[in-house]
Image: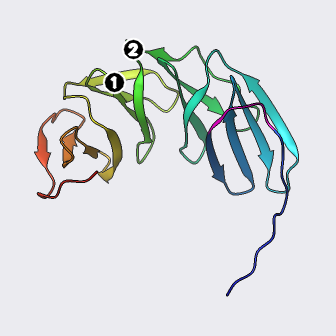
Amino acid sequence: MMSWAVAWSAKVTAPAASIVAGRGWVVVGHGRRMTCFSDDGEHLWTRDLLFTPHQLVHDGHRLGVLAAHGFTVHTLEDGEPPHEGRSVPRGFSSLAARPGGGWLASGREGGLHLFSDEGRGRQRIETEAPRAVRGWIDRDHAVVHAQGGHLQVVGLGGSEDVRPLGEETWT
């Protein structure tokens, strides 16, 4: 059996709502803030936000943040956003980094929203409200978890077709 020990700990304001880690760092979404720590526990930066960040995603260079009705992109160096971000009625339910750059967010009221690397809106694909964006077949085909529990492949970039991916129902 492998043994382990706590390397470091830190106290953040409650509630801790989201977390994402990369090589040499971890970012915690808590209260109405994001705080970045190095892998040895050193505080690197804290950014105040308007709302509690409920999902943090890393694309290899930047952080994508879902908070309340909005989506913003932040730098890893200091947590600053390059611009004000985007929002939709009732907000976004899930976010995924797009292979080769960009972001895909699912709207709580339906639709998939394609964004550039910097978080600027590019395209909206009309679909029923998916539970979550789960992954990618390739840059132009996303895998989403539909409300009925089935996985679907959604075409992006000109081909907006939606096809089932298997017959299994996932909870």
Q: 10 Å neighbourhood of mark 1: few (<14), some, or many (≥20)?
A: many
Most foreground residue, 106 or 77: 106
Q: Position of residue 133 (x, y in %)?
A: 34, 42
Query: What is the span of residues highlighted in magenta in the rendered image?
Result: 12-17
Of helix, strand and loop, which one carries label 1?
loop
4 left or right of 136 in image: right
**Quadrant into which the N terminus falls:** bottom right
**Residue 1 visible, this angle:** yes
Q: Is residue 3 above or below residue 56?
A: below
Kind of residue indicated by mark 1: Arg
Kind of residue indicated by mark 2: Val
Residue beneath disc 1: 108
Most foreground residue, 36 or 124: 36
Of helix, strand and loop, which one carries label 2?
loop
Residue beneath disc 2: 88
- Does residue 14 belong to the magenta stretch? yes
- Does residue 23 belong to the magenta stretch? no
